Amino acid sequence: MALIALTRRGYRMSQLRSNWAFHRGFAADHNGSAKGNIWEAPGSPSKWKEEHFVFASLGGWGTLFFAGYKAAIGGGKKKEDFPAPAKPQKAKDGSLP
C-alpha cells in the first residue's frame, strides 16, 4: 500500500514541476507590436524595448543632474595656474650656488 502511495505522490510532483516552466520575463509583449533594440531605431523611442527605454531615460536624467551639479558648484571654471619654479642659474665658473 505504501508503495502505491509513493508512486502516486511522485506522479503528482512531476505534474507540478511541468507547470514551473521557465519563462522570459523581459521578452517583448506578445499581444503588442514587436519592439526593437535601441540601436536599430535610435530616433523613435516608441519602437524601443521597454528596458532599453528605461536605460536611456535614466542615462539622460543622470547626465542632466550631473551637468546641473557641475554648473551649481562652478565646475566649469579653470583653477589658477601657478608659475613653474625658477631653475637655478649656474655661476660664471660653472658651479651651482
Image (cartoon, rainbow, N blue to C red):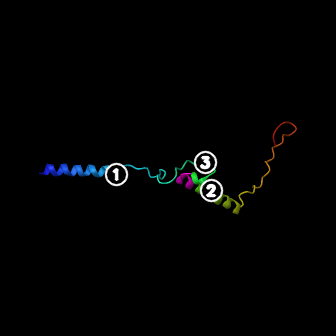
Q: Is residue 1 left or right of residue 35?
A: left
Q: Which residue is mark 1?
A: 20
N-terminal of the two: label 3 or label 2? 3
Residue 2 in the image: state x and y as whole percent: 13, 51
Residue 71 in the image: state x and y as whole percent: 70, 60
Q: Amino acid at mark 2?
A: Gly
Secondary structure beneath dot 2 equals: helix
Can you name the residue that lies furthest to the bottom here? 72
Q: Which residue is mark 3?
A: 41
Residue 97 in the image: state x and y as whole percent: 81, 43
Secondary structure beneath dot 3 equals: loop
Nearest to viewer (mark 3 / mark 2): 3
Residue drawn at x 30%, y 50% is: 17
Q: Amino acid at mark 3?
A: Ala
Q: Is residue 5 left or right of residue 73?
A: left
Can you name the residue that lies furthest to the right here? 92
Q: Main secondary structure of the magenta part?
A: helix
Q: Nearer the viewer, residue 80 or 14?
A: 14
N-terminal of the two: label 2 or label 1? 1
| Residue 3: in magenta span | no
Bounds of the magenta segment = 48-55
Q: Which residue is mark 2?
A: 60
Residue drawn at x 57%, y 54% is: 53
